[in-house]
Image (cartoon, grey):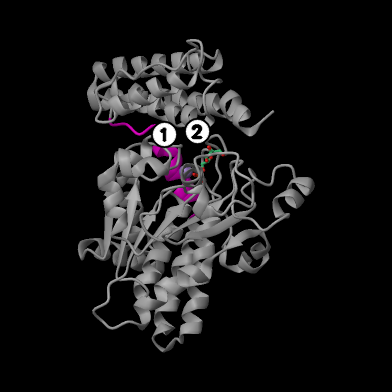
Amino acid sequence: MSFAYFTVKDRLPQILTKVIDTIHRNKNKFLEDYGEEGIEAEKKAISFFSKLRNELQTDKPILALSDQQPDTQIWNQYLDYQKTLLSNGEEPSWFRSPWLYVECYMYRRIQEGMCLSPPISGFDVFEDVKKESFFQSQPAMLSLCAHLQELKGKMSGFSNTEVREEIHKLLQVSLWGNKCDLSISGGQDNSQKTSVLSSLEDFKAFILVDDMDSLWNILLRNRDGNNESRTRVDIVLDNAGFELVTDFILADAMLSLNLATEVHFHGKVGPWYVSDTTKHDYDWTIQKCLATNNKWMSKCGQTWKENLKKGRWVYHQHLFWTLPHEYCTMAEVAPDLYTELQKSDLVLFKGDLNYRKLTGDRKWDYTVPFSEALRSFHPAPLCSIRTLKADVQVGLQEGVGERLSAAETDWMISGKYGVIQFSPVV
Ligand SMILES: O=P(O)(O)OC[C@H]1O[C@](O)(CO)[C@@H](O)[C@@H]1O
Ligand SMILES: [Mn+2]
């Protein structure tokens, strides 16, 4: 049984069941906020999601979206396109369509279900689990915040070698932070319990592609350049919770160590793949850090808030990140976003889903160069920072993929391995 099949058959219905439970559990909140209308909406949403789960489990055709959102038409056109790929008038269905498309489609249908259930439409069905995962990983986050503040205290005398070592560390922390997504665990707790910093050396053996020095060469230019030089780094965010805090720590360090002058973050417009970061999650996380009674963490929160105010950090959102499209179509489907990314000196793509979209989720040979798998997607020098949770991997040395496959059947989906994989503009 392929991982794709297992996902659609077991994991996605499980996530829908959790969504239904969550809405049911919040019934009183809806009653308090909206009275009887809130209760009616709760019923409507639950019946929508039960029906959706049934469509999925019985392999019904993929339906066009019926809400009126800015991306509705694009989704429906994409469905029409999927139809053209099938011969003899067959209809795309849940089990007979590409995994990437079906999985994205399910999350888009969840948005549709909420959208069609006013007045509770603004309710984020994954907010509870995202918050819980933040609180569960708080000890691990605290130790990272303490580490960062300590670093700031001593970095003024740092040599480039020391700075390099530090940024390598924080890149790895951000990589392993990607283990903590809630979609792979079907919405179950998957938080970080221990400090990653102390385990980095042990984990090194699991980094299959390590291009950290290519990033370093870009960042070093800013540090060594004159004061007027500007270096913009973009981070295409993945999960809220522990991973987001590791990304904040990395972004903060890049500014503080004078490796970048501005960091631009890209988040999702709505709830996505359970734990993906929305604007609300982003602001909430900074606010929560700021308000804790731990002095290191609250100092971090304060700095991050100021960074936003002063424009050193910028938050962006774009519909494209929640479309099913692979990134080689970005220039055509979302030219404005492509142009925005072209302004960057380095774009970091966090997480597994981004990797699948970068490579088009194809069955590439393990040794195909990353730049080739990106096809025409080269807006700026870019890097994927991702733990392996889906069966696509390129850019490995000859024989490595085969050796791993022989030794561990689940090496591509366990999240145990990771890559920090760079592509220049070619
Ligand atoms: O949060 P991430 O790293 O993008 O992981 C999400 C991944 O989890 C899955 O749902 C299961 O592997 C994939 O579809 C997806 O690529
Ligand atoms: Mn995710």
Residue 271 x, y percent position in the rendering = 37, 36
> Dot 2 surroundings within 10 Å: few (below 14), some, or many (20 or more)?
some
Q: Quadrant of the C terminus?
A: bottom left
Relative vertical location of residue 188 with respect to residue 94 in this rendering, above or below: below
> What residue is shown at x 55% (from left), y 12% (from top)?
58
| Residue 155 seen in the figure | yes
Q: What label sits on residue 324 in the rendered view?
A: 1
Residue 139 x, y percent position in the rendering = 51, 59
Q: Which residue is mark 2?
A: 100
> Dot 1 surroundings within 10 Å: few (below 14), some, or many (20 or more)?
some
Residue 128 is covered by the magenta coloring: yes
Label 2 residue near ligand 1, CB within 8 Å: yes
Of all residues, the one furthest to the left in this rendering is 310
Amino acid under disc 1 = Pro
Amino acid under disc 2 = Leu
Residue 141 appears left or right of 279: right
Q: Earlier in the sequence, mark 1 or mark 2?
A: 2
Question: Main SS of the magenta segment?
Answer: helix
Residue 363 x, y percent position in the rendering = 60, 39
Q: How many marks?
A: 2
Q: Which span of residues is magenta-colored?
A: 122-137
Residue 194 appears left or right of 349: right
Asked if disc 1 and disc 2 are in contact, CB closer than 8 Å, the reply is yes
Secondary structure state at the residue bearing disc 1? loop
Of all residues, the one furthest to the bottom in this rendering is 157
Q: Quadrant of the N terminus?
A: top right
Residue 342 appears left or right of 362: left
> What residue is shown at x 73% (from left), y 54% (from top)?
399
Residue 202 x, y percent position in the rendering = 67, 65
Res 329 → quadrant: top left
